[in-house]
Image (cartoon, rainbow, N blue to C red):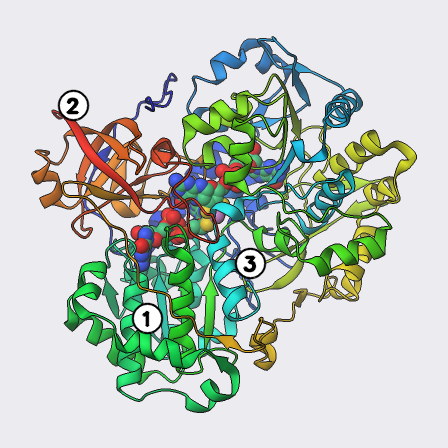
Amino acid sequence: MAKKPPIGDPVQDAPHVGAPKHAAAGLPAIGHTAKIAGAQMGARRATLTLLKVNQKDGFDCPGCAWPEGERRHTFEFCENGAKAVAEEATLRRVGPDFFAAHPVADLAHRSGYWLGQQGRITQPVYLPEGGTHYEAIPWERAFALIADELTALDTPDEAVFYTSGRTSNEAAFLFQLFAREFGTNNLPDCSNMCHESSGSALTETLGVGKGSVLLEDLYQAELIIVAGQNPGTNHPRMLTALEKAKRGGAKIVTVNPLPEAGLERFRNPQTAAGLVGPGTALSDLHLPIRLGGDQALFRALGRLLIEADALDDDFIATHTHGFDSYRDAALSTDWDEVQRATGLDRGRIDELFALVLGAKSTVVCWAMGLTQHKHAVPTIREVVNFLLLRGNVGRPGAGVCPVRGHSNVQGDRTMGIVERPPAAFLDALRREFGFEPPRAHGYDVVRAIRALRDGAAKVFFAMGGNFVAASPDTEVTEAAMRRARLTVHVSTKLNRSHAVTGARALILPTLGRTEKDRQTGGDQFVTVEDSMGMVHASHGGLAPASPHLLSETAIVARLARAVFGDRSTVPWAEFEGDYDLIRERIARVVPGFADFNTRVRRPGGFTLPHAPRDSRTFPTATGKANFTAAAVEYPAVPEGRLLLQTIRSHDQYNTTIYGLDDRYRGITGGRRVVLLHPDDATAAGLADGDYTDLVSEWTDGTERRADGFRVVHYPTPRGCAAAYYPETNVLVPLDHTADTSNTPASKSVVIRLERPHPPRP
Ligand SMILES: Nc1nc2c(c(=O)[nH]1)N[C@H]1C(S)=C(S)[C@@H](COP(=O)(O)OP(=O)(O)OC[C@H]3O[C@@H](n4cnc5c(=O)[nH]c(N)nc54)[C@H](O)[C@@H]3O)O[C@H]1N2
Ligand SMILES: Nc1nc2c(c(=O)[nH]1)N[C@H]1C(S)=C(S)[C@@H](COP(=O)(O)OP(=O)(O)OC[C@H]3O[C@@H](n4cnc5c(=O)[nH]c(N)nc54)[C@H](O)[C@@H]3O)O[C@H]1N2
Ligand SMILES: [Mo]
């Protein structure tokens, strides 16, 4: 059903393939960064800007959510952080002349890479109904137009307010406040596609939907299991922490279908030896698990621990609930099933078990490899079971470490960006602001797409992100978006979502985190929360990309004034002028933020409370940490079909493509590649270098197609293929989601390879 996504620009997707690398970072990383940053901003600006990343008076890196740590190098070097900064601090500009030269139909035929390369958007622009081009529009007209559309809706629930995870705490707090004062909980966010499964599983089992470890715990851990995560590319600064843990004696085990370079060896660019030497071997053991086999693996470890009587009986008796039924389930684990699910023979699992037994404290880290499966929530619950058995929660060197994606995705949730808000949060809003917030649950990402598709939602407003490219089932999502009456995007740069619009569309350009934010109350800073619950300030330093930009906070405040006029109980204008006033309210509404303005001004900020970590108390329904005993699941793959995972290359930030190389995996110059086990390729009649179409098969009989992928022989388990997102989102059926969390199961899409093409010249 799906066609090839548009290329239509001078970029040729012609991948070359060499051998995968066995180590990450080192000198090539610095060279590559200098090239990308220099091209975007020139050498001088590049150096000055990069010196400010993650410094105490600087800005928070817009890359990932990995914490900064106690010792900040003058140049806290991270190749992919630098690329994220360069992307934002670029000197290239997209102004009204650009939009005059490029009709929307032209933008719709460009690749995401090309769109992003055009530079920063400088002015608000408007696409009128039936119009062919975006046109410049004054801010106040833009707000009036949105207000008209919103007030014309039959119910506030016909509006959808999406958030991507770069939004600051202050902007996020205002955005949810605006949506709720308007009358809806339709607040889907990128987290719905990301760590929602972690949040669901951890809230139920431990009572807090966030990680329970601090950096210090990693340094003290005796065993760190990294499952379903590729930190060398996606959280490069984590490698520095793993290196330190390793030097402190920790064993590191990686569980991943792919042998990811950063996890094998790390050449720390912070040290001279790291730049030129062989680097540190990080992984003591790599288990090349089949996609979706992790629940079975952790269940098997549970069985082995119980049989070896290697449990923390006191912890289990005092702090947990449900152990007996878990024990029964674990003891009935079927080894043949474990072997089928994981693809691992017993010997490998025993090797891991020996490390588990030998470790007094264990941390498990994970990311999208665990969260984006149909059975993601029971998989993560199984990680919790495994840790609870040995009391590995709430003591030094032990715990759960879901490694978050976007730099403030965790903070946005803390600020109330959630479609199913807890009653206590709504009560606090009512007390503080004097209006009655809506109680009915709103749409998450997948439900928002269905609502747009079915005409139940009519206005779509995005605070950042690239909804149509990041979401599953591209054709369905794009058709749904085109049905909207109005689509609005608060953005820094052009992307696909600006080209696939409702009847009318607006692009509202905003300040990036690197930029100075001056309001009537003086220079402002914003705050963010990292993956470990540390909150700190971020001060932009660069001159804004254009004098016409507004901060995200100002955009929400002005929109609110346009919608509510003087009928509001919220002092929107004051909030816009002075972000301290927003933080005062956050301090009164959100638990853990008392004295926010003072504490966040201290160097390094402060750490949010986390009951399981701090005091081994578990705010769950039972008041204890819950064992769960779900049946073991793993993906069923029909004969002759493969399971496809959709992943990130080294040169992208989600839908933002920095370049066409995936250096660590040995792929350069193109992205339309599919990584296959050589025997699977041969079985499909394909040689390395051949081209093939990927056809996804969904249980309702529908098919989806992505054309023209170059076959790459790769060390991945049999039956498990990999290709890059967002190109492969056309293949992910909208209804293929994780149970409970509703996260698109984009790491287990059943596909067949079709129509082999010979190699291209
Ligand atoms: N440079 C850069 N940094 C980023 C991002 C980016 O795009 N670029 N994105 C940010 C965001 S929003 C996020 S959420 C994170 C994402 O960070 P990651 O989760 O590391 O990103 P993915 O590329 O999706 O990689 C998934 C990893 O899990 C493995 N995997 C897949 N399925 C399974 C499975 O069933 N079991 C196991 N054990 N492993 C599996 C894959 O082989 C791969 O190594 O990174 C953040 N940081
Ligand atoms: N198939 C498949 N699909 C996936 C995934 C996968 O692994 N496989 N991963 C999922 C995950 S983990 C995530 S988090 C989502 C990501 O989904 P999104 O967060 O929606 O996507 P991004 O590509 O991160 O958004 C990039 C855009 O954000 C805008 N932007 C950048 N900085 C700022 C800023 O400071 N302010 C504002 N207002 N805008 C800014 C720019 O215009 C840029 O084009 O994708 C999900 N989709
Ligand atoms: Mo993410």
Disc 2 marks a residue whose amino acid type is Arg
Q: Earlier in the sequence, mark 3 or mark 1?
A: 3
Disc 3 marks a residue whose amino acid type is Thr
**Which residue is found at the position 35% from the left and 22% from the top?**
11
- Which picture quadrant has residue 230? bottom left
Disc 1 marks a residue whose amino acid type is Ile
Question: Disc 3, disc 2: CB below 8 Å?
Answer: no
Q: Is residue 232 visible?
A: yes
Asked if the residue at label 2 sits under 8 Å from ligand 2, the reply is: no
Q: Is residue 620 left or right of residue 172?
A: left
Q: Secondary structure at mark 3?
A: loop
Find the distance from the CA under tag 2 to the CA under tag 1: 41 Å
Task: Check disc 2: other Cα within 10 Å, few if <14, some if 14-19, many if 20+.
Answer: few
Find the distance from the CA under tag 3 to the CA under tag 1: 28 Å
Residue 592 rendering spot, x and y as whole percentages:
71, 67
Q: Which residue is mark 2?
A: 760
Find the distance from the CA under tag 3 to the CA under tag 2: 47 Å
Can you tell which of label 3 and label 1 is closer to the viewer?
1
Q: Secondary structure at mark 2?
A: loop
Q: Residue 74 has which mark?
A: 3
Which quadrant holds the C terminus? top left
**Which residue is found at the position 34% from the left and 82% from the top?**
359
Residue 678 rendering spot, x and y as whole percentages:
11, 44
Q: Secondary structure at mark 1?
A: strand
Asked if the residue at label 1 sits under 8 Å from ligand 1, the reply is: no
> Toward the viewer: 46 or 294?
294
As drawn, 592 above or below 514: below
Q: Which residue is mark 1?
A: 252
Which quadrant holds the N terminus? top left
> Toward the viewer: 77 or 754?
754
**Residue at the extreme bottom of the image, as rendered:** 314
